[in-house]
Amino acid sequence: MTDTRPGTGTPAESKGNWGRWGPEDERGALNLIEPAGVRAAAHEITTGRSYSLALPIARGNQPAFDFRGSPQRLTLVSQTDAMYDGYEGGEDVGSNEDVLIIPSHNLTHMDALCHVQAKGRFYNGFPADTFRSHTGAGRCGIDKLGAFATRAVLLDLPRHFDTPHLEAGYKITAADLTACAERQGVEVRSGDALLVRTGYLDEYKATEAAGREPSFAQPGLSLDAVEYVRAHDICAVGADNSAIECIPFDDRFLSVHIALLVESGVPLLEHLWLTDLAAAMAEAETYSCLLCVSPLPVTGATGSPINPVAIV
């Protein structure tokens, strides 16, 4: 019988990171980020320009899975409400406030290490049955990851293959990532975040604008590409698609999520808008940048909306 208690290591068939940073670790591959690496990443900034990688938070016309629901902005108070009558300043003063309802895994977001379980375990062997509907994750919640800044490398696969976007369902391999990095002349280092542009969001927007139904199939990482992430000790993976991995899934349901989140403790950044960043990097002839990511510290949450900022 395989021992999968925290700190005893991953099952024999896996090549993950259980126990690597101790039996109580809940940050996973973010432990690979070192202060010296962050300082070095800051010195790589060449243009000083910042790029938001987040999609607009709005109802409709954005890629989303229907079961998660659309984000909503509801007015809590308005400057037109009578509640301000009698306040100092009279009719010359008022205020407006909102209530935001945002599904944690639609639009641009970050997956916590408790987002997916396999064989009853989260990352590092923590039991998945510690999750509760009213309190969320007892282990590996998004609050345990925290904000981070690190060097990031963008691999622009459509530019590499000289195509507007990868084909729906295309399985990105380790060889694809290696060839793209070599052609761009960029080195992937330990502690880096890997940003993979597939062109999916560009295709999605064009399809929507033409009044057609976007394809459910999407290009993304294959299981083979997971070995690239592990070999380079990458701290986080982001992409401009819905699941980082290809859809239909490679081998089995959520196979890449299991390999990265559960086995390796690598957080995933999904639905990143990478088109503007890719164009700026091509113009500046650099494919590395400083990436800053800050999820909302919601206790026990399985993920969080994010507005990642890349500084080139």
Image (spheres, rainbow, N blue to C red):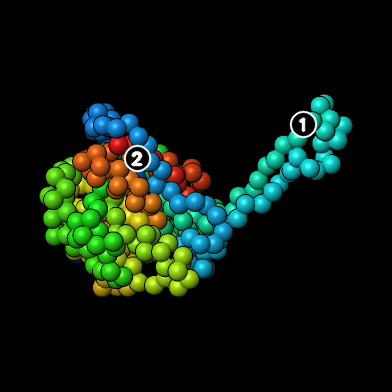
* 179 with respect to 242 (left or right): left
x then y, percent, for residue 103? 53, 57
Q: Nearer the viewer, residue 99 or 310?
A: 310
Question: Which residue matches tag 2?
Answer: 310
- Assign a secondary structure to mark 1: loop
The kind of residue tagged 2 is Ala
* 75 with respect to 180 (left or right): right
- Assign a secondary structure to mark 2: strand
The kind of residue tagged 1 is Val
| Residue 307 visible in the snapshot | yes
Q: Nearer the viewer, residue 140 or 99?
A: 99
The image quadrant where one finds the N terminus is: bottom left
Give the residue at the far top of this rendering. 88
| Residue 28 visible in the snapshot | no
x then y, percent, for residue 282? 24, 45
Quick one: label 2, few (<14), some, or many (20+) residues within 10 Å? many
Checking the image for residue 93, the label placed there is 1
Mark 1 or 2, nearer chain start = 1
Q: Is residue 307 above or below residue 118?
A: above
